[in-house]
């Protein structure tokens, strides 16, 4: 498919909205699920995001 | 990085972005930030995002410079970034390198969102390997995040990273070479066609590649504003999208096993004594030359590249075999090596210059300057498998660096015999004296030594 006048951007945009909505929802459910578990008192460890883990992977000396 | 448009110090890949551009002066690389980007640059620096990313080793550090700008009418600031020793391109990376570059991009985007910014590009060319790790080199890639907006670089991320990674992991690792043809990443409809049907059962690939490609086709003639119809995307949804991409990339894997080269040393006829002798010779010669920049051609998994690193050099460790390069990169990661960059390079057809006017991405041979080239257990492949006359080989090595450490492998060697088994022996000049004669056209032979327990010879030469 060679696009000259047509732009694949609209499709990319729409699919992004759809995936993001589903992914965002699953994160929200996941977060509440963790809260619920904490509330019940089964899981005491704090939930670290992988974002923070990355900070520890600094270049070695 | 040396190439410039005629009469302009502005880097020839720096013409698309109105935010600023790269230029070199007196051999120093600078980045001009234009007024158009002033507000965003200030946000990047003052929000703490810059410091956070630099600390995490994800963004190249820079200092603001007082030198005269390259374009006074547009200038906001001039930056002097830390210099990456060698610019490499995604079609030269092993699977692991491309995967780590993808994960670095997503990690940067997640952090940026926390500081009210977002990446406006997700180009693989904006990532370079610096001290053994992927780092963003384009300081002007950030824009202020507007709540409700989607990720403008989503499609580019899928084309530059996800599609090639999926093709390499699920179809064939050599498909990374498509990136050489498609400078803005692999078109998703093509990736979708080439991927095995089974990838449709994997949620991430189904969504980000297959459905993404269908949506592109279906809405190709619809304007974005029309397609959007006022819909907004919450920050949580955007984070969800990034996390979904992270999970999809992490699940892709490719194991460098069973190729001809990745287990070359185990399978080949070197004895331990021969190997050690070769290491000692290479190490001694490199120390004597005091080489700072080394190009190891046919490096396999980088054993001799590491000899060079031990003598204090920064090494480009190039090999044709993606599996050997992958093993090499995994060693770099495991040992946190900072001075070795493994790259997939086919010497019989090294990366060409590509892009607009053939100036956007330099060819492999244009990019670096090296003190010494290592060509160990290599020339029989070029001379016999690829029919390159020895004089041409010498002329090629003379363009690479002033010094050359080269191994001569006679026809009687079992590895050469293997090559000759399937070809007619038309290589009359391929003898030790023929080799020396040919290389003397460009080099002075300073040292030579037989390698213990073998019929092979090692030479130290200097360009005439």
Image (spheres, rainbow, N blue to C red):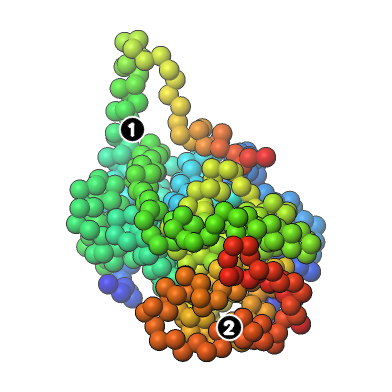
Residue B213: quadrant of the picture: bottom left
Label 2 sits on a secondary structure element that is loop
Q: Of discs 1 and 2, which sits in the foreground?
A: 2
Residue at the location (63% across, 65% down)? Answer: B451
Residue at the location (55% across, 68% down)? Answer: B377
**x, y percent for residue B381:** 49, 75
Residue B237: quadrant of the picture: top left
Q: Residue B417 carries which label?
A: none
**Of B134 and B35, which appears nearest the observer?**
B134
Residue B1 appears left or right of A38: right
Residue B389 appears left or right of B223: right
Label 1 sits on a secondary structure element that is helix
Against B231, is B220 above or below? below
Q: Residue B431 carries which label?
A: 2
Which residue is denoted by mark 1 in the rendering?
A27
**Of B4 and B237, which appears nearest the observer?**
B4
């Amino acid at each position: 498919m060679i696009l000259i006048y047509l732009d694949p951007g609209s499709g990319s945009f729409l699919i992004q909205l759809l995936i993001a909505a589903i992914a965002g929802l699953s994160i929200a459910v996941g977060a509440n699920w963790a809260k619920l578990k904490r509330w019940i008192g089964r899981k005491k460890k704090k939930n670290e995001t992988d974002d923070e883990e990355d900070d520890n992977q600094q270049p070695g000396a | 990085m040396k190439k410039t448009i005629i009469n302009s110090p502005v880097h020839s890949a720096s013409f698309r972005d109105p935010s600023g551009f790269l230029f070199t002066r007196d051999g120093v690389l600078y980045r001009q930030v234009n007024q158009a980007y002033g507000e965003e640059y200030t946000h990047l620096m003052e929000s703490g995002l810059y410091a956070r990313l630099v600390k995490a080793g994800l963004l190249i550090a820079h200092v603001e410079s007082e030198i005269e700008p390259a374009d006074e009418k547009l200038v906001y600031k001039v930056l002097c970034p830390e210099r990456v020793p060698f610019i490499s391109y995604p079609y030269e990376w092993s699977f692991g390198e491309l995967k780590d570059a993808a994960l670095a991009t997503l990690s940067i985007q997640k952090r940026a969102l926390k500081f009210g910014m977002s990446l406006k590009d997700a180009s693989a060319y904006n990532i370079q390997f610096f001290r053994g790790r992927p780092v963003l080199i384009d300081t002007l890639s950030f824009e202020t995040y507007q709540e409700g907006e989607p990720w403008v670089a989503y499609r580019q991320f899928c084309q530059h990273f996800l599609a090639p990674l999926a093709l390499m992991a699920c179809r064939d690792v050599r498909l990374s070479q498509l990136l050489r043809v498609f400078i803005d990443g692999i078109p998703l409809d093509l990736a979708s066609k080439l991927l095995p049907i089974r990838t449709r059962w994997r949620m991430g690939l189904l969504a980000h590649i297959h459905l993404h490609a269908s949506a592109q086709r279906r809405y190709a003639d619809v304007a974005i504003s029309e397609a959007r119809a006022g819909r907004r995307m919450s920050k949580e949804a955007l984070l969800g999208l990034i996390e979904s991409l992270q999970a999809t990339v992490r699940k892709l894997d490719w194991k460098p096993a069973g190729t001809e080269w990745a287990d070359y040393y185990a399978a080949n006829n070197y004895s331990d004594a021969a190997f050690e002798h070769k290491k000692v010779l290479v190490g001694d010669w490199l120390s004597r030359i005091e080489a700072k920049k080394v190009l190891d051609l046919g490096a396999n998994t980088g054993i001799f590249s590491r000899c060079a690193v031990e003598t204090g050099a920064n090494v480009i460790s190039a090999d044709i075999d993606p599996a050997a390069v992958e093993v090499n990169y995994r060693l770099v990661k495991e040992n946190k090596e900072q001075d070795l960059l493994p790259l997939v390079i086919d010497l019989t057809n090294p990366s060409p210059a590509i892009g607009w006017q053939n100036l956007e991405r330099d060819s492999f041979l244009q990019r670096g300057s090296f003190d010494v080239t290592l060509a160990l257990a290599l020339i029989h492949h070029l001379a016999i498998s690829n029919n390159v006359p020895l004089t041409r080989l010498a002329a090629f090595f003379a363009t690479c660096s002033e010094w050359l450490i080269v191994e001569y492998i006679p026809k009687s060697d079992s590895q050469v015999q293997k090559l000759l088994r399937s070809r007619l022996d038309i290589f009359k000049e391929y003898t030790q004296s023929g080799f020396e004669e040919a290389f003397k056209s460009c080099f002075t032979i300073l040292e030579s030594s037989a390698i213990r327990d073998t019929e092979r010879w090692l030479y130290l030469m200097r360009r005439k």
